Image (cartoon, helix red, strand yellow):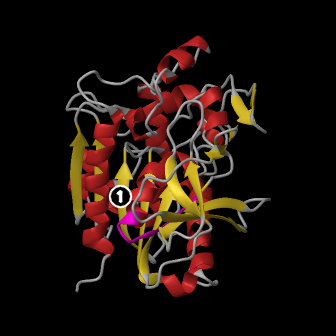
Amino acid sequence: MRPTLRFFALLLAGISSSPALAADPVGVRKISVVSPEHDRALAVTVWYPSKGDGETTSIGDNRIFEGSPASKNASLESGRFPLVLLSHGSGSRAEGMAWIATRLAEAGFIVAGPNHPGTTSGDSTPAATPKIWERTQDLSDIITVLTGETPWKAAIDPEHIGVLGFSLGGSTAMELAGARADLGAYKRYCDDYPAMMDCTWFRGGRGFADGEQVAVKKFDLDSIDRTRFERSNRDPRIAAAVMVDPGLATAFTAGSVRTIDIPVSFINLGSVGQIPLAVLSDALAKQAPNASYAQVNGANHFSFLPVCKPGAAEFLKSVEEPDPICDENTSRSRADMHRELTGLIVLAFERSLKPAR
């Protein structure tokens, strides 16, 4: 759940020119969506099956990460497609999920992801992190706009909408599917496991505002709006959900998880015995009536980030980045883990969102 630090925060926004590699280029557009939860519009990236007639670009390419090719502002391909909403991890950006968004669009989905205000790179504080209700509203607002406005409404199948979330985004997807969190349980978790990344984040010291690191005070979990934190954020338009290393895994009530009535898939990054309790979701998969569970062996929590460029790990060490953003398991590359993740995620949505033919 915790955001990665300053250099990662400032680099994920990159969009640069780069040769497209896909035979059928995925289209990409930037749109704005007004949300009543925020005092500014949401910045949303939309990937989609296209006619490949746009400007060649690369989403997320920067000093650290490899980008993903796309066709900027290309024409929408003809037809109606399922919609998948993306929810990034705390301190990340939608562009950091471009590698999987591109693969989903190639597989015939329209994919839309916002940069969640208050928990995105360069704009992230401990006080904003627990406000899951703002994140769920972001995605619900995007559904409303895309299914109601030209040109998207003609291209989206409103009966087949899913959500994919990573880390804090996984918590967001859980809530949209119908799970509810217990503030008392979350506080007990941080009392019992104070060294977990999300709990150390709440102890304060730093945050991010306007792209700069800022000093912040310790955040008291008792100050969270309990009514909002524990309310239902179920969106009945969501027909399937995939959660990768979902945050708040220890705080969701078993009763609410058992009432989830849509297909859900849980994916943990890591081998047995190496997955942090903060995101371990095998028990959640056993509680949900229509759930699957998978682990990606040899991975860690940062394996969902884009593929790192050569020399990125050394650069991050030189600037004293404490998180192992680009450290790779010698037995397995991040690109290889992404291939496995792509197979799991695309298959889950193919089964749950593609109408039977």
Judge by depth and name the residue closer to the eye, 326 or 177.
Answer: 326
Bin the neighbour count of mark 1 within 10 Å (Cα to Cα): few under 14, some 14-19, many 20 and up: many
- In the rendered structure, which segment of residues is drawn in magenta? 106-113
Instruction: Please say if 21 is above or below 73.
Output: above
| Residue 130 pos. (x, y %) | 58, 45
| Residue 290 pos. (x, y %) | 23, 66
Instruction: Please say if 106 is above or below 168.
Output: below
| Residue 242 pos. (x, y %) | 35, 58
In the image, residue 170 lies in the stretch drawn in magenta: no
| Residue 237 pos. (x, y %) | 46, 77
Residue visible at 42% across and 66% down in the picture: 24
Residue visible at 52% across and 35% down in the picture: 65
In the image, residue 107 lies in the stretch drawn in magenta: yes
Q: Total number of numbered labels?
A: 1
Judge by depth and name the residue closer to the eye, 28 or 205.
Answer: 28
Left or right position of 278 against 116 = left
Three-letter code for the amino acid on which mark 1 is drawn: Val
Instruction: Please say if 111 is above or below 115.
Output: below
Judge by depth and name the residue closer to the eye, 148 or 24.
Answer: 24
Which of the 4 quarters of the picture holds residue 113? Answer: bottom right
Q: Quadrant where the C terminus lies?
A: bottom left
SS at circle 1: strand
Specify whether residue 233 is in view.
no
Residue visible at 28% across and 72% down in the picture: 352
Residue topped by disc 1: 242
Left or right position of 140 against 78 = right
Residue visible at 59% across and 53% down in the picture: 57
Instruction: Please say if 135 is above or below 245.
Output: below
